[in-house]
Amino acid sequence: MQLNANIQKLERNYIPKNFILNSKDDVIPHFEELLAREIGSVTELIQWLQDSSELEAALSEDVCWRQINMTRDTENKEYEESFTNFMMNIDPHLKPYAHQLNEKLVANPFAQELGDEYAIFLRGVKSSIELYREENIPLEAEINVMAQQFGAISGKMSVEVDGKEFTLQQAAKFLQQPDRARREEVYFKVAKRRAEDKDNLDDLFDKLLEKRHQVALNAGFDNYRDYMFKALGRFDYGVKECEDFHASVKKYMLPLVEKIYAGKKEKLNLSELKPWDVDAVPAGQEPLHPFTTGQELTDKAIAVYDKLNPFFGNCIRKMKEIKHLDLDSRKGKAPGGYNCPLAETGVPFIFMNAAGTSDDVITMMHEGGHAFHSFLSHDLELSGFKEYPMEIAELASMSMELFTFEDWDVFYEKADDLDRAKQEQLERVLTIFPWIATIDKFQHWIYTHPTHTRTERTAAWIEILNEFYPSNIDTTDLEDIRAIQWQKQLHLFEVPFYYIEYGIAQLGAIAMWKQYLENKEQAIENYTKALSLGYTKNLKELYETAGIQFDFSESTVKELADFVSGKM
């Protein structure tokens, strides 16, 4: 297939080219026209869908920019008010119209004559209709605004080391140093700073929990977990498969992780391995320092992607050219990293908190994979075709981490450093699984016990954390710190139940890497073909197009765990 990074912004043929969204009154006339329009043929229905999609893309990009701006500067009240205004004063008025458009589509007799490429899209529309409740609109608006408070609270967190102020993301690099006393000092400083906002984050989560549970009850569900499984479009697996995944991780991944940490303990020559030791380098070594600035990270990432395929490098060049990259960590910036698709422009936005570490290289490779997904699916006919589920989105990103790491010599000129970086990446591929299982199982407990107390939540968290925590990391006298470690996971606050996808996709990425080692060109071709389909095929078909199976059963977990272990 022809790969082109020089994508064009969608042309407006239905809404005015100078359309700007300031209030609900700017957009409601378009919804009303779409609802009133007569549709007398398949051709007219397709045109109606294209016009609806054009409106949807413009609205989607508008709110994306509001959120991007707010996360880039959490202390800017104007950005916060702009986002809040959309969520509280615009979006709630548009949702009933969007629901009516869905009903109009499903009721139209010509919908049955649409091509196969519309099947997945129509399935999602029908599911949205089933979930829709008017009384949930104000609740969802409040939840969306409230969830952003996590970024505002976390964005203010910093610690002082050697008289200098560091964000928590920047401070993490001290945990890689060979000086154990320094690592311990910074570990406790970070923990103390997090503890200062413990009650604020507990208060926020309690409010989110209450409102989310009410949304589920309003929609006819017993709990928010079951509601979200349907809302997330988990048509290809359910609760049992998630529980089986948890058990498989405990059985096959955790022993390998403990083996990794046993090796770490031996290299560091320690009598016991503490949490502040797990990222450390031995005495005589320095932490890997692959880059200094976000600009350097960008340029080196482009060089790596060029080696893989010039298309990938050109995508990042395009993002750099139009300033769709914000990579450096700074105070006042929300934590974490993301790639935000921009439905109308097509060129997405990558947000990171880079501090010059090897983890930042992996994050850039990861978010780059998401970006390529946006580029490859941009030309699909409808916005709805591009709303692919996270299980394939994370396959795109996690595969890219493994596809590229043979070419990380761009970041690590010394052969020994490159070997270390590759070894650390393979270790990370395995060590992330117990944390994924921990967070996912914790969410299952939280939302199936909606009236729990904070004490009960802490007890459940500790029990689940211990179930998947490596037994050879000594956590003596760290109970208070461990009790609030869940509060650092933004997904719990902002995107509930979005986490097991990382585990499913990591297994898929390992399979993709295995395929890549056997035939690089074929693997890249399969990868780009699968991503270019957006969500016009179901998950099993998308994975098959990528040349692998959508499978996270016990046997697959064991097989792929053994494969990575062998490569290490």
Image (cartoon, rainbow, N blue to C red):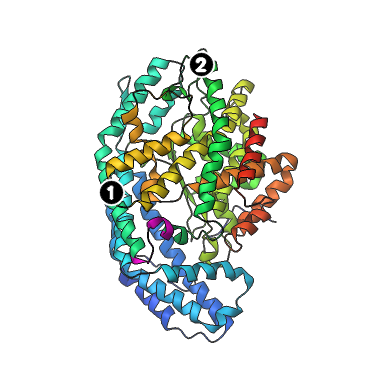
Q: Between label 2 and label 1, give the one nearer the viewer.
A: 1
Q: Tell me which amino acid carries mark 2.
A: Leu
Q: Residues within 10 Å of mark 1 (few under 14, many from 20)?
A: some
Q: Are marks 2 and 1 in contact (CB under 8 Å)?
A: no
Q: Is residue 224 highlighted in magenta?
A: yes
The local secondary structure at tag 1 comes to: helix
The residue to which callout 2 is attached is 268
Name the spot of residue 304 as percent of width and height, x first. 61, 37
Of residues 316 and 206, the one drawn nearer to the viewer in this rendering:
206
Q: Quadrant of residue 438?
A: top left
In the image: residue 201, left or right of residue 425: left
- Residue at image point 50% right, 77% down: 106
Q: Residues within 10 Å of mark 2 (few under 14, many from 20)?
A: some
Cα separation, mark 2 vs mark 1, equals 41 Å
- Quadrant where the image shows the N terminus: bottom right
Q: Tell me which amino acid carries mark 1.
A: Asp
Residue 206's disc is 1
Name the spot of residue 474 as percent of width and height, x first. 43, 23
Asked if residue 322 can be seen in this view, the reply is yes
Residue 328's disc is none
- Quadrant where the image shows the C terminus: top right
Of residues 150 and 131, the one drawn nearer to the viewer in this rendering:
131
Q: Decide: is 47 above or below 521.
A: below
Name the spot of residue 351 as percent of width and height, x first. 44, 44
- Sequence-wise, the earlier of marks 2 and 1 is 1
Count of numbered circles on the image? 2
Q: Which residues are magenta?
A: 218-227
Q: Decide: is 106 above or below 525.
A: below
Asked if residue 324 can be seen in this view, the reply is no
Of residues 342 and 135, the one drawn nearer to the viewer in this rendering:
135
Q: Is residue 297 highlighted in magenta?
A: no
